[in-house]
Image (cartoon, rainbow, N blue to C red):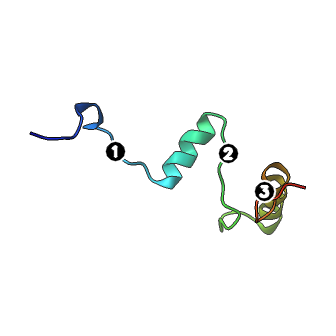
Amino acid sequence: MSMISTIYGHAGQRDGEQLRRDGWRSGIFAVSVSDQRLTTLEREAIRAIGERLYGGAHGTRP
């Protein structure tokens, strides 16, 4: 007898990129400041927004 629920029998794990695409379609924006597809200006803007909303590298908010 299997101990795995049939509810999760067809569930698959999505990769991070797929999660980000799905989130974007739901109004959530998830991006890494080290994403090489971004320009330097775009990375700095995202870093500034993240620090304003969530604090600096150590989680301290200004």
**Quarter occupied by residue 22:** top right
Reading the chain from its start, which is encountered first: label 1 or label 3? 1
Q: Which amino acid lies under the numbered mark 3 shown in the image of this protein? A: Ile
Q: Is residue 38 left or right of residue 41?
A: left
Q: Is residue 6 left or right of residue 46?
A: left
| Mark 3 → mark 2, Cα distance in angstroms | 10 Å
Instruction: Tell whether label 3 touches label 1 (CB within 8 Å).
Output: no
Question: Which residue is tagged 3?
Answer: 46
Q: Position of residue 17 (x, y in %)?
A: 52, 53
| Mark 1 → mark 3, Cα distance in angstroms | 30 Å
Name which residue lies at 65% across and 65% down: 35
**Quarter occupied by residue 23:** top right
Label 1: which secondary element: loop
Q: Quadrant of the C terminus?
A: bottom right
Name which residue lies at 52% across and 46% down: 19
- Among all residues in the image, which is located at the extreme left? 1
Residue 12 tag number: 1
Q: Position of residue 28 (x, y in %)?
A: 66, 40
Q: Which amino acid lies under the numbered mark 1 shown in the image of this protein? A: Gly
Q: Position of residue 37 (x, y in %)?
A: 66, 64
Label 3: few (<14), some or many (≥20) within 10 Å? some
Label 3: which secondary element: helix
Instruction: Tell whether label 2 touches label 3 (CB within 8 Å).
Output: no
Q: Is residue 54 above or below residue 32?
A: above
Label 2: few (<14), some or many (≥20) within 10 Å? few
Residue toward you, 58 or 11: 58
Reading the chain from its start, which is encountered first: label 3 or label 2? 2
Name which residue lies at 78% across and 54% down: 50
Q: Which amino acid lies under the numbered mark 2 shown in the image of this protein? A: Phe
Label 2: which secondary element: loop
**Count of residue discs:** 3
Question: Which residue is tagged 2?
Answer: 29
